[in-house]
Image (cartoon, coloured by chain):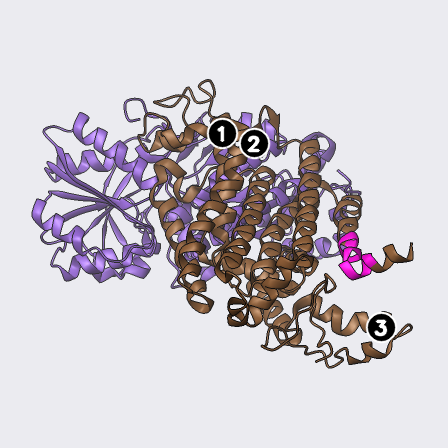
Amino acid sequence: MADKKDPIQAPLTDTQRRKMLMGMASAPALMMPAMTWANAAQYPTAKVNTTKLAVTDTEVVVGQLHSATGTMAISETGSIQAEQLAIDQINAMGGVLGRKIRVIKEDGASDWPTFAEKSKKLLVQDHVACVFGCWTSASRKAVLPIFEKENGMLYYPTFYEGLEQSKNVIYTGQEATQQILFGLDWASKEKKAKTFFLVGSDYIWPRTSMKIARKHIEGHLRASSVVGEEYYPLGHTNFNSLINKIKLKKPDVIFAAVVGGSNVAFYKQLKAAGITASKQFLLTISVTEDEVLGIGGENIAGFYSSMKYFQSLDNPNNKAFVEAFKKAYGPKSVIGDVTQAGYLGPWIWKATVEKAGSFDVDKIAAASGGIELKTAPEGYVKVHDNHHLWSRARIGMAQADGQFKVVAESPELIQPDPFPKGYQ
Amino acid sequence: MNALKIWIGKSGLGSVLILALIILVVFPLTMDLFRLNLVGKYLTYGFVAVGLVMLWGYGGVLSLGQGVFFGLGGYMMAMFMKLEASDPVTTKIQSTPGIPDFMDWNQITELPFWWEPFRHLPLALIAVLLVPTLLAFIISYAMFKRRVGGVYFAIITQAVALIMTVLIIGQQGYTGGVNGITDLKTMLGWDTREDTAKYILYFVNGGLLIGAILLCRWIQMSKLGTLLLAMRDKEDRVRFSGYDVSMFKVFAFCLAAMLSAIGGAMFTLQVGFMSPSFVGIVPSIEMVIFAAVGGRMSLVGAVYGTLLVNFGKTYFSESFPDLWLFLMAALFIGVVLAFPNGLAGLYESHVKPLFGRRKAKPETTAAPGDGTPHTSTGGKPLSRGAPISGDVQGQSA
């Protein structure tokens, strides 16, 4: 309120630097500046920005809000890198509506109140056009009221529990049914599984996921039943009692949603107890290439994971993406499901802005439904009117080298259904 | 007039007045609403720091579990606001409309009975004050009656903080789990997210904090305050003089708990949610750091310390998102190394002598000029009615 700086004028103070950057960007492709200017002139700032966002004739400011420090940093780093990569690529192509994207990076520090504070800062002080960020459900829940109150736009990359839909959020990961149902059907049909043992970490995402899984197993799969359902606190590392129960019940499938550091102990102890892929079928919805780094490929080889993206996907989009990612962040870096979903965020936002011809959040929210992305590494994706993505589900078998071999893929794009009827 | 001046000087009200001016006049005039709201959030931690000055600085009891009481106060405020936000109309999409959303996710179909009182604001406010105080009473009575003190007490408070976190996270159907209680909007229909509401809450919060400092100052100047100091320095002597030492400690602990709970409730109102990340060991220790940076003997110093640390945290993390934790660590180590008595100690040893020089009386020459005054080492005479900004002068030994 008392802020005397006009948010639109403020960024102009570093024109010098920006000119230099643009000069650098134009060096490899001489055609670009001409195109850029023409594009920007076509969309005068007064027209594309009627809500005092930080958009000038040459620049648009966006926020990035992940945990760079704390316990979640290991998971969120992939998203930070992928979003940055997408933004760099978009800038190299001339930006959005002829404007370069400038990122204001904030650290949520794995602490939900800090997420709330920083999201408010990005929206109220920096007037960012949109924010790419959050990873855990808890952090999203903490910032959601702020995005709704201040009318911001959040691109959220993680697969999550569903039961949420907001005008101010685009969910680029899967909601629970997109990840779970295909995997269970596959297990039932291909692996002839009848008995399921559900195990997860104890918080909202595994709880909701297992609720959906149980309803599906008991209601939709032929002659199938749940023989056990166990939850362990986040960070739990002693799974001996669980292993005893598994040995007692001898389920056809262990269906797992154990997250974070617990994963490492979980798979190592399974292996130590002789529960390996040769004897036991295990399907997880919480292990991507990122987690395998910690678990160790040899400890999980042969188990299955249900995701929408694996680094090993064989299509031209993905090959280009993996190559660019490794070039930017080193040949040893791996790309998990969420990292890829993070990469989609800036591209979907760019496509939406160009469709709406505006940066205004209301217009973007309205224009989001129906946005298509043919260049997504996971293949073709489309934004549903409920702000989630249509996407395929895939089953990957873990390999000893830390990669997954895709063994099944849903034939069609699966429609997102954050409030699934009959599963609540 | 002169008498009033002396009394103000002696009681240390001058420094409270300056703090009140800064909080209630200077900040609102110089900051935009976003920053002011942040300061409001920091000041809620100030309640905990002020409580710690009474408990740790004066009572000599170090608690590493103040987050429990801050969290309890905050949670009970949040329970009231969550119930108000979960009316059957807005929650009609749930399997059981009318209960908080996290209960619905956890397959709970009716409101637990102990949530019922939180439908009413007066009951909720009473609970904010009484429940943490009662818990503090039970813990401290059990400990101090058995003469458990010092480091053992600190460890037990840590254990309580850990138990509380595990309990809240484990019982997510009733508490919201790791996510905490989120999406709080109104209090009796009053939208706490509006700009005017933010201003009002800021001033209410600032006023309450000043009130808390005055209350604590009054206690310090009373016989009770003297006894607390005496106990800290030579507990046995006080006991042998016929005082029930444990009950004084219980009092100090309950007082600190109640202040923390008020801070927690104000936090929920201003920030709009409550989560277990305030209850655990790490935030509890952080709150002790606030008091230590400000000076654990000084009520106003503790508030300045809280502000400094949190401003630092916000500033460093906004300016250097990759490096800020190192800078924070440098700040803590630097302050503790350079000024063992915190900001208030710095003021006493370096700034105050500059003012005092002109009208120096013979006995003020005894004031320490070496910058390393020591507190709480045994045998120090009692300083009743010491200036509020700290009684760290060596005094005439």
Give the amino acid type for the residue marked by disc 3 in the picture: Leu
The answer to whether dots 3 and 1 both sit on one chain is no
Residue occupying the point 25% across, 60% down? A297
Tell me where residue B47 appears, x and y as whole percent.
Answer: 61, 50
Q: What residue is shown with label 1?
A: A166
Picture quadrant where residue A4 is located = top right
Q: Does the magenta stretch include residue B192?
A: no
Pointer 2 chain: A
Tell me where residue A140 appears, x and y as whole percent.
Answer: 47, 40
Tell me where residue B75 appears, x and y as whole percent.
Answer: 48, 40
From the rendered image, report the letter of the chain displayed in brown: B
Residue A174 seen anywhere in this rendered image of the structure: no
Eye-nearest disc, 3 or 1 = 3
Give the crowd class for mark 2: few <14, some 14-19, many >=20 residues within 10 Å: some
The answer to whether dots 2 and 1 both sit on one chain is yes
Give the amino acid type for the residue marked by disc 1 in the picture: Ser
- Disc 2, disc 1: CB below 8 Å? yes
Q: What residue is shown with label 2?
A: A148
Disc 3 to disc 2, C-alpha distance: 53 Å
In what quadrant of the picture does the C terminus of chain A appear?
top left
Pointer 3 chain: B
Between B356 and A9, the residue placed more toward the observer is B356
Q: What residue is shown with label 3?
A: B354
The residues colored magenta run: B7-18
Give the crowd class for mark 3: few <14, some 14-19, many >=20 residues within 10 Å: few
Classify A357 as above or below B326.
above
Disc 2 to disc 1, C-alpha distance: 8 Å
From the rendered image, report the letter of the chain displayed in purple: A
Q: Taking A305 as reference, is A355 left or right?
A: right
Classify B235 as above or below A13.
below
Return the disc, 2 or 1, that comes first in the chain's sequence.
2
Q: Is residue B14 magenta?
A: yes
